[in-house]
Every structure is written in structure tokens, then in C-alpha cells.
Amino acid sequence: MVQATLVNGLAGGVVATIVMTVFMMALGDDSPPPTAVLWAKYVGDGPPEDYMMPGMALHMLYGLGAGVAFALAVPLLGLTVTLTTAVGLGIAYGLGLTVVGAVLWMRIVLGMEPEPPQVAMFTFFHLVYGVVLGALVGVGVL
């Protein structure tokens, strides 16, 4: 059993976002991420392709924040934090992030209508994030 801590959430969020991004870059369709679309729509004045770096920086901040939220929420569930429970919770969390990202951010905030293959990849990437985050929090990275 380990203690889920703020530091574990920070470190786990950063590492999980980096791993997720590697998968996105290797398996994605080279389109700008939704965070670049968000940046282009609400901050910039050009197409999303012009905002790949700010979009990725924003995505890193989201991942870091989501990692902290996860590490702070896990103890509130009153469960013993083991590697198995943390990974299971990470999978559930990744699915939750998918729903929030696909429905709230993509459809409502950005007005995007992603095709089923895009939603499938979006789901896969967030499951990768959840598994890595859960594993790192579960083993107590720091």
C-alpha cells in the first residue's frame, strides 16, 4: 500500500501525458490536437496547425492538473491504494476524461464532430494516460 500524494499526482500526470503524447504522435492522423483547435479558436487568429506547440503545452498542463486531481481524489474513495486498484481507477479515470474531452470540449466548446475512428483513438490515448497515471500513483513514484 502506498499513499497517493500531490507529488505523485504531479509526476504521474507529467509522465502519463508524455507517454500519451508519444502514442498520439506515433498512431495519430497528424491533425492538430483539440487543444490546438481551442487555442486557435479562443486565443489565436490563425488555423489550428499554427498552434501545435501552444496546444501541446496546454495539453501538458491539462495532464498535469488531471494527475493532481486523480492523486487527491483517490484517498477520498477510502480504498487501499495498491498497484492494481490504482491502475483500475486510472482506467476508469481515462474513460471519464474521454467522455469529458469528447463531449464537453470537442463537441460543445469547440463545435467539432469527431468521426468514430477519431473517437476510438481519443479513447485509446486517454486509456494509456489512465493506465500510466494509475501505475505511477500506485507504486508511489516519489
Image (cartoon, grey):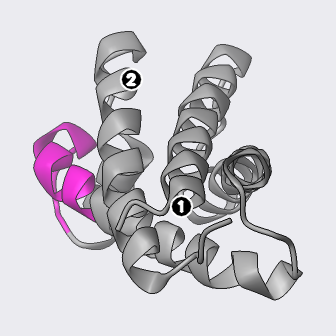
**How far across and how far down the image is residue 41, in percent?**
34, 62
**From which residue to which does the magenta span run?**
44-58
Pick the quarter of the image with the N terminus. bottom right
Return the residue at label 2: 23
32 is higher (above) or lower (below) than 51: above
Local crowd size for mark 2, using a 10 Å CA cut-off: few (<14), some (14–19), many (≥20): some
Report the front residue among 26 and 46.
Answer: 26
Can you say whether 115 is above or below 106 in the image?
above
Q: Is residue 8 magenta?
A: no
**Residue at x-position 38% and y-position 68%:** 64
Pointers 1 and 2 in contact (C-beta within 8 Å): no
Q: Is residue 118 left or right of residue 47?
A: right
Using the image, tell me which numbered label, if any, was put on residue 137: 1
- Residue 49 image offset from top left, x and y in percent: 19, 37
Q: Main secondary structure of the magenta part?
A: helix
The quadrant in which the C terminus is found is bottom left
Label whose residue precedes the other's in the sequence (1 or 2): 2
